[in-house]
Image (cartoon, rainbow, N blue to C red):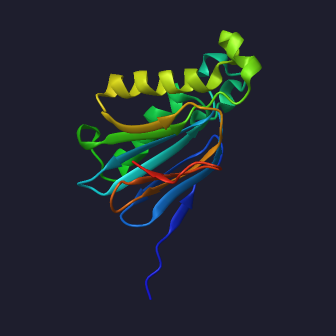
Amino acid sequence: MTSLSTVKVGMADLGVLVGAGSLKTTGLGSCVGLTLHDPVARVSGMAHIMLPTSSIAREGSNLNKAKYADTAIPELIDRMQKSGAMTSRMVGKMAGGAQMFAFAATSESMRIGPRNVESCKAILAEYGIPLKGEDTGGNYGRTIELLGDTGILIIRSVNQHIKEL
């Protein structure tokens, strides 16, 4: 009997998978679930990003790199490269970035979801990694699962259809 592993990625966390199995994270509201996949090396990565930039961090030397888009994406790329992936072959997909509360849309600092999405796109562009699919925005939560053998991203949310990117 063969069992495939599922790597659970928590909030402000990231994970890497080599080969078959999946990476999964739950509870994406304004957070962004960013995934990268190298189809040749079959190396996959996922980050559950909470905030757009580490410039607002208060952790000091104990910075959680997985929490911020500008530190999580470089860290994820580095870990994937150590597992055999090449940046030039990576493709990105992402979901989340919702605006969970209508009152927050009036303040730029409270537009966390949209700012997370914008920051992730800008950082992927810096690395030359194409964004092959996204399911972002809205005002609802999501759970995502990236399949390591195919790079397919499955998105589940309440009152929405299951989507595949």
Q: Position of residue 44 (x, y in %)?
A: 39, 52
Reply above or below: 42 against 133. Answer: below
State the residue at coordinates (62%, 27%).
51
State the residue at coordinates (61%, 16%).
55
Q: Position of residue 95 (x, y in %)?
A: 51, 39
Residue 52 in view in this figure: no
Front one among 64 and 96: 96
Would residue 28 appear left or right of 121 to someone viewing this image? Answer: right
Would residue 124 appear left or right of 16 to someone viewing this image? Answer: left
Reply above or below: 29 against 39. Answer: above
Q: Position of residue 18 (x, y in %)?
A: 38, 60
Residue reaching furthest to the right: 103
Reply above or below: 118 against 28. Answer: above
Which of the 4 image quarters holds residue 109? top right
Which of the 4 image quarters holds residue 146? bottom left
Reply above or below: 31 against 150. Answer: above
Residue reaching furthest to the bottom: 1
Front one among 127 and 144: 144
Which of the 4 image quarters holds residue 7? bottom right
Residue 125 in view in this figure: yes
Rendered-image quadrant of the N terminus: bottom left
